[in-house]
Image (cartoon, rainbow, N blue to C red):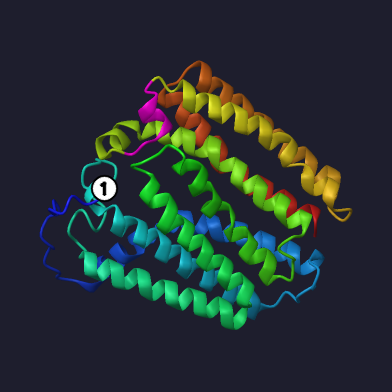
């Protein structure tokens, strides 16, 4: 957090509108938003077919859920950067972000974050329902108000951040007519929660020097050997294997072969990559694990979509 004395450079002079638009898009972390939207779209699809209310799948519903969720996610990522702007300036990986580089002022970022939050929550409330909008707001609160402040204070931040990474799936689920307490919906959210641990352990290792410089209490900072991070990756990958098969048990409409085979194979590859990372902590094994985790999500979601079609 800020020490009270700003270390950020003076705002740069603007000569064109397009670079500024690009910087505001960068504040939203579009790659993260896109991954989140893919997951939300898949849960929306499943819920419209098998949810308790059976909400019809329409273009208007899909558009409102996608745009509303994207705006709230963009706001959360913007506020994360706004709160961490002083720390980002100390990390080579983040020093060129719009705020620490001085291309966008803190006031502009704050206004953008509040505007996108208001627009996103309002859109979800008006077109998808009150519950999806409240879930989106709660997810925003966990990410901005809990996860971000915890990063320089406790390694528990990873477990808290994983909550805000998983609960957006409930936005799609409830918008599609699924019950918040539906076991199938809970299982899908749980898979996304568990998946994040191997994924983030790889990131934490690759960014360990930057996290240490910024004072973030990550597993790879507290244990520079990487064994703690590797152990967590292995344990959570092992948990993911049976947990990812829960949708087959909880739903008689999801085809076991279409879903179970690709998801199990993807899970075994992730488990093997996590074991390799544990036994040989290096940038090479961490990058391999990171790539595998990034491939797991589309394989899992595609299998869920096809098996439940």
Residue 95 makes an appearance in the image: no
Numbered label tally: 1
Q: What residue span does the magenta drawing correspond to?
A: 216-224
Location of residue 185 by image quarter? bottom right
Q: Is residue 220 magenta?
A: yes
Q: Name the residue at the bottom extreme.
A: 126
Q: Residue at x 22, y 50 (%)?
A: 86
- Residue 1 horizontal/vertical position (percent): 26, 50
Q: Name the residue at the right extreme.
A: 252
Label 1 environment density (alpha carbons within 10 Å; few <14, some 14–19, many ≥20): many
- Residue 198 horizontal/vertical position (percent): 54, 35
Instruction: Tell me the residue that label 1 is attached to.
Output: 88
Could you tell whether 139 is left or right of 127 in the image? left
283 or 220, which is in the foreground? 220
Q: Residue at x 48, y 48 (%)?
A: 161
Could you tell whether 176 is left or right of 83 in the image? right
Q: Residue at x 37, y 44 (%)?
A: 151
Location of residue 245 by image quarter? top right
Q: Is residue 56 magenta?
A: no
- Residue 293 horizontal/vertical position (percent): 56, 39
Name above or below for residue 124 compared with residue 212.
Answer: below
């Amino acid at each position: 957090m800020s020490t009270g004395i700003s270390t950020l450079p003076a705002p740069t002079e603007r000569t064109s509108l397009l670079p500024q638009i690009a910087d505001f898009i960068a504040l939203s972390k579009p790659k993260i938003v896109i991954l989140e939207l893919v997951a939300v779209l898949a849960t929306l699809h499943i819920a419209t077919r098998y949810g308790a209310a059976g909400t019809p799948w329409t273009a208007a519903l899909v558009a409102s859920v996608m745009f509303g969720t994207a705006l709230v996610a963009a706001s959360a990522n913007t506020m994360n950067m706004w709160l961490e702007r002083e720390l980002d300036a100390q990390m080579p990986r983040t020093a060129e972000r719009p705020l620490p580089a001085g291309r966008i002022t803190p006031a502009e970022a704050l206004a953008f974050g509040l505007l996108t939050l208001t627009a996103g929550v309002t859109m979800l409330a008006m077109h998808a329902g009150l519950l999806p909008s409240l879930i989106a707001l709660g997810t925003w609160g966990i990410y901005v108000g809990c996860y971000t402040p915890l990063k320089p204070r406790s390694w528990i931040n990873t477990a808290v951040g994983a909550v805000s990474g998983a609960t957006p799936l409930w936005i799609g689920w409830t918008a599609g007519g699924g019950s918040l307490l539906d076991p199938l919906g809970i299982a899908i959210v749980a898979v996304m929660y568990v998946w994040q641990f191997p994924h983030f352990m790889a990131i934490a290792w690759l960014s360990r020097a930057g996290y240490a410089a910024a004072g973030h209490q990550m597993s790879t900072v507290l244990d520079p050997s990487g064994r703690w991070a590797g152990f967590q990756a292995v344990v959570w990958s092992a948990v993911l294997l049976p947990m990812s098969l829960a949708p087959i048990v909880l739903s008689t409409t999801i085809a076991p072969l279409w879903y179970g085979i690709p998801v199990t194979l993807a899970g075994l590859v992730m488990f093997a990559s996590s074991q390799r990372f544990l036994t040989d902590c290096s940038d090479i094994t961490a990058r391999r694990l990171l790539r595998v985790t990034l491939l797991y999500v589309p394989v899992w979601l595609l299998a869920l979509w096809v098996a439940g079609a």
